Image (cartoon, rainbow, N blue to C red):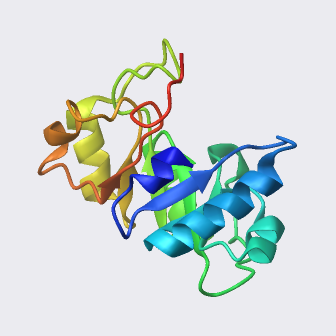
Amino acid sequence: VPAACGLPRGSAVLLRHYGDPARVELARTLRAVCRARGLELWIGGDPAFAQVLGADGIHFSERSLPACGRWNRPHPQLRITAAVHSWRSIVRAARAGADAVLLSPLFATRSHPGAPGLGRLRFAQLAHRSPIPVYALGGIDEHTAPALAGSGVAGIAAIGAFVDTR
């Protein structure tokens, strides 16, 4: 909630607290903060909950990408995003009807220690080829974000820059 209060208007907050008993109350609080501040609220992996909550979007994991076909969009205004880690997954997400993808990890990240980063060059290659907007995730902070200039990035997503993951 404090991180959401510091975001600029037009940003989105992604709630991925899968199975957390406090999720419902947290989601309601975030919904109120997002409405008051002009932010979007995206719910991770639960279209029914997103619709009941009046969220702006649904975010799917790479594992939930349909093998073929498209996701059922419960409401036409809901944005759909997906986590991806490769070109193949970007294509699958686009075919499934995603509006955008979060491609990760771009750089080394505290939230996934030891995961190899794509690096700026590989990220730029994938972002420029992508048929849908690509957001960068993984090791994004005030020091690494400037390196994305000219990479084809649609925006940035961050966890560790806002929340201590140690």
- Corner quadrant of residue 48: bottom right
Give residue 74's position: percent from left, percent from top.
75, 80
Q: Residue at x 62, y 69 (%)?
A: 32
Q: Is residue 134 found left or right of 76 in the rendered image? A: left
Q: Is residue 98 found left or right of 23 in the rendered image? A: left
Give residue 136's position: percent from left, percent from top.
36, 45
Tell me, yes or no, if residue 20 can be seen here: yes
- Corner quadrant of residue 153: bottom left
Quick check: 117 above or below 146?
above
The furthest residue to the bottom: 76
Q: Nearer the viewer, residue 125 or 83?
A: 83
Q: Residue at x 81, y 75 (%)?
A: 52
Q: Nearer the viewer, residue 21 or 29?
A: 29
Q: Is residue 35 found left or right of 137 in the rendered image? A: right
Quick check: 145 above or below 36?
above
Give residue 23's position: percent from left, percent from top.
78, 49
Number of marks present in the image shown:
0
Q: Is residue 151 found left or right of 73 in the rendered image? A: left
